[in-house]
Amino acid sequence: MAKVQRTYEQLSFSNPGKQFADIGLERGGRRREAAEKQRTTKKKPHYDGKGYFIHPEFNEPIKICDCLKRECPGCFPKCRKCYSKMCGPICASNRNTIPVQVSVNGQGGLIIDNPLININGKKRKQQKVDEEEDEDDQEYSQPTLPGTPKSKLSLNAIEEIVKHEAEIYKKAGVDGIILENMHDLPYSMSKDVGPEIVAAMTRFSISAKSIFKSPKKPSLIGCQILAGANCQALSVAAAAELDFIRAECFVFAHVADEGFMQGNAAELMRFRRNIGADTIAVITDIKKKHSSHAITADVTVGEMAHAAEFFLGDGVILTGNATGKAANVHDIKEVRQHSLLPVFIGSGITSKNAKDFKSANAFIVGSYFKKNGKWQEPLDPENIQAFMHQILSF
């Protein structure tokens, strides 16, 4: 008690209880300010170039999930995929790495998730990591339309891609282009394709047309909306004043990977008349790719082409059994025997086999014009120009 009294006397407090309380508040305020300053000026981990993120204070590797490949937002980040703190060992089960025992400055026992070590314990080449990051970047830039599961880009960003590709095709001298929502996986059936897809496709079609069309050279622009959304595609073509659409399941029926499809020629052609779009051609696939045709196994490709002509189609498209797979060259002759419609080859055309299909009226080339021959990749301008030069030599 005497000690406390001396403290009071030394400080000359008339109201020591209140003054001590004020000092406590003041000290607490300073602590809060210091904590806030420390929080706002907190250093982030740095990457040591060897596969480790180093803690800024302890100078030791920290656990980090490979989901955060290029950046670390804090000392103990939360994984953006599994939302688990310090989730390196957890996420290791989801990829090609395992937790690795390391020693730092003689202190062992740290477990980190090393992106440069594979499941065999061998070092993975840095080039491999770079390739994987490039693949991620390319996947991110795919022009998937808003509202679909893999959508990441804004309409403005997608429009820039469309304009850029239209310019590439124009410089290469191709005769026409088709806009298709190929990246909108998984594809919806026609009845489930919403107005947002129609609106986006109309916008991009108008943009592509403004770049690609030229009074100096005749050209064609068309569109297709997956899956089997022929009336929606015709709406886009009418609004954007395109030349044609690519239609699925115009006649007969088949089972596609999206489900059962049946011919909609009657609905489509009546719709074309109703909206005043008679000048827009309907080019239709027959025995189309990615489909089972068991229910029409007794109908030849020639008979199907005849049915497409009979139902007022403007052209037929022959394909292989999948994207990038070549059609049967003998089918061209059979179609010619049953129909007067122009024949398009809709898949699998390359510089090696193009000459085999030169009796067709036109080629629709997709995969071969992309880098590495993969439809998911961006365009390869040099490949397109070389192909067009070859075609002109026929």
Image: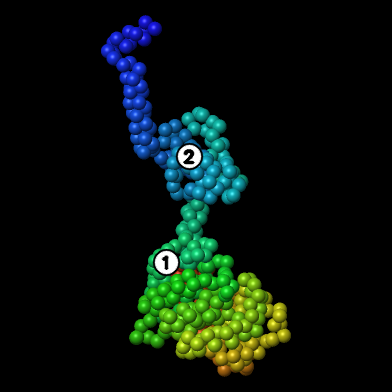
Q: Position of residue 345 (x, y in %)?
A: 55, 82
Q: Residues within 10 Å of mark 2 (few under 14, many from 20)?
A: some
Position of 50 compared to 265: left or right? left
Quadrant hosting residue 344: bottom right
Residue occupying the point 69% across, 86% down? 299
Residue occupying the point 39% across, 7% down? 1
The residue labelled by disc 1 is: 155
Q: Is residue 317 above or below residue 1?
A: below
Q: Position of residue 381 (x, y in %)?
A: 42, 72
Q: Position of residue 85 (x, y in %)?
A: 52, 41
User: The disc labelled 1 sits on which kind of residue?
Assistant: Leu
Residue occupying the point 52% across, 33% down? 103
Give whichever of discs 1 and 2 has the lower sequence position: 2
| Secondary structure found at label 2 | loop
**Total numbered circles:** 2
Residue occupying the point 34% across, 29% down? 29
In space, the residues marked 1 and 2 are separated at their CA atoms by: 35 Å
Quadrant hosting residue 100: top right
Q: Position of residue 122 (x, y in %)?
A: 57, 45
The answer, for residue 394, to whether it is visible in the render is no
Q: Return the residue nearer the eye: 122 or 21.
A: 21
Give the colour scheme shown.
rainbow
The residue labelled by disc 2 is: 76
Q: Are marks 1 and 2 in contact (CB under 8 Å)?
A: no
Q: Is residue 323 above or below residue 157?
A: below
Instruction: Name the residue furthest front.
Output: 15
User: The disc labelled 2 sits on which kind of residue?
Assistant: Phe
Position of 336 compared to 104: left or right? right
| Secondary structure found at label 1 | helix
Q: Nearer the viewer, mark 1 or mark 2?
A: 1
Q: Residues within 10 Å of mark 1 (few under 14, many from 20)?
A: some
Q: Return the residue nearer the eye: 168 or 195.
A: 195
